[in-house]
Amino acid sequence: MRSRITPAAARSLMERQQMSGLSVQSFCSQEFLSPVTFYYWRKRLRSVESQEASVLVPVCFEKVLGTDGPSGVVPGSLELTYPNGVRLLVPVRSEVSLIRELVMML
């Protein structure tokens, strides 16, 4: 009976193959693994990683007018609040490209 590979075991195989410096063919031969199985798992794991990376996260935009805003908020600024509590304050007149860069950094 053939044993099944778990996603965790497949990740371990991918890492070990990269660290070994061997070609996929040589590595699979040493591990008694079919190269087809190796490539299947590599494709599957990459697909999962790309889906995780592209998940949209809700962001709340608040424009603070005057001095009635929460403490520490600069009047006339744009506050982005992430679900994890991270706050980003940006002057209202900032370029959209600056805001995009700041959001991508987080």
Image (spheres, rainbow, N blue to C red):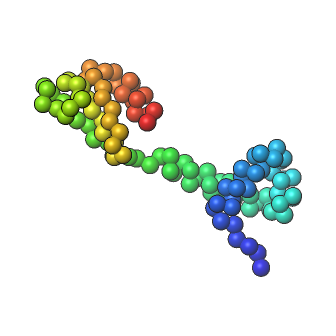
Out of 59 and 51, give the one closest to the viewer. 59
- Please state the horizontal and vertical placement of residue 65, each as a whole percent of the image: 15, 28
In the rendered structure, the answer to whether residue 13 lies left or right of residue 28 reads left
Question: What residue lies at 76% left-to-right and 46% top-to-bottom?
Answer: 18
User: Residue 62 lies in what quarter of the image?
Assistant: top left
- Please state the horizontal and vertical placement of residue 86, each as a whole percent of the image: 35, 39
Q: Please state, as top left, top right, bottom left or bottom right, where the N terminus lies in the image.
A: bottom right
Residue 50, can we see it?
yes
- Please state the horizontal and vertical placement of residue 98, each as a whole percent of the image: 38, 24
Q: Please state, as top left, top right, bottom left or bottom right, where the C terminus lies in the image.
A: top left
In the rendered structure, the answer to whether residue 69 lies left or right of residue 34 reads left
Out of 70 and 64, give the one closest to the viewer. 70
**Residue at the front extreme of this rendering:** 71
Residue 39, can we see it?
no
Question: What residue lies at 81% left-to-right and 47% top-to-bottom?
Answer: 20
Question: What residue lies at 22% left-to-right and 25% top-to-bottom?
Answer: 74
In the rendered structure, the answer to whether residue 90 lies left or right of residue 41 reads left
- Please state the horizontal and vertical placement of residue 11, each as a whole percent of the image: 67, 55
Question: What residue lies at 84% left-to-right and 63% top-to-bottom?
Answer: 32
Label tally: 0
